[in-house]
Image (cartoon, helix red, strand yellow):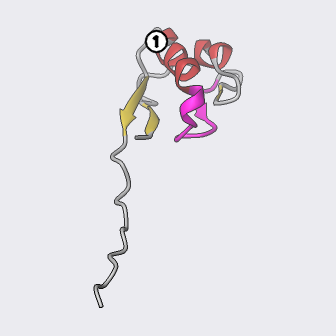
Amino acid sequence: MGYRVDADLDLCQGHAFCEMEAPDYFRVPKRGQVEILDNEPPDEARDEIERAVESCPTRALSIRELPDPPTHQTQEKEE
């Protein structure tokens, strides 16, 4: 199962704690708001992303679980 990172820009105040925790996935320009560089980061980055989300003092970031994609199974025909 994958996940998605979302930002509520109404809450973001540009503290950049997320960028300090996960610079490959978040950028906060001077006097700006967070830019998410990859909204659906790999599972290997999950711990880093969670630390970044938890570090936000205004709780502007969130993680949302994505449903598994449907699987396409082929059925063998009996002869």
Question: Is 34 a magenta residue?
Answer: yes
Magenta stretch, residue numbers? 32-45
Q: Residue furthest bottom?
A: 79
Quickly name the residue at label 1: 54
Q: Is residue 30 above or below residue 75?
A: above
Q: How many marks?
A: 1
The amino acid pointed to by label 1 is: Glu
Q: Residue at x 40, y 26 (%)?
A: 62
Q: Determine the secondary structure under disc 1.
A: helix
> Residue 57: within the magenta?
no
Residue 35: horizontal and vertical position, in percent? 60, 34
Residue 38 falls in which quadrant of the image?
A: top right
Residue 79, horizontal then vertical, whole percent: 30, 91
| Placement of the N terminus among the 4 image quadrants | top left
Query: Mainly helix, strand or loop, the magenta region?
Result: loop
Within 10 angstroms of label 1, few (less than 14), some, or many (20 or more) residues?
some
Residue occupying the point 41% across, 16% down: 59
Q: Could you tell whether 5 is left or right of 15 in the image? A: left
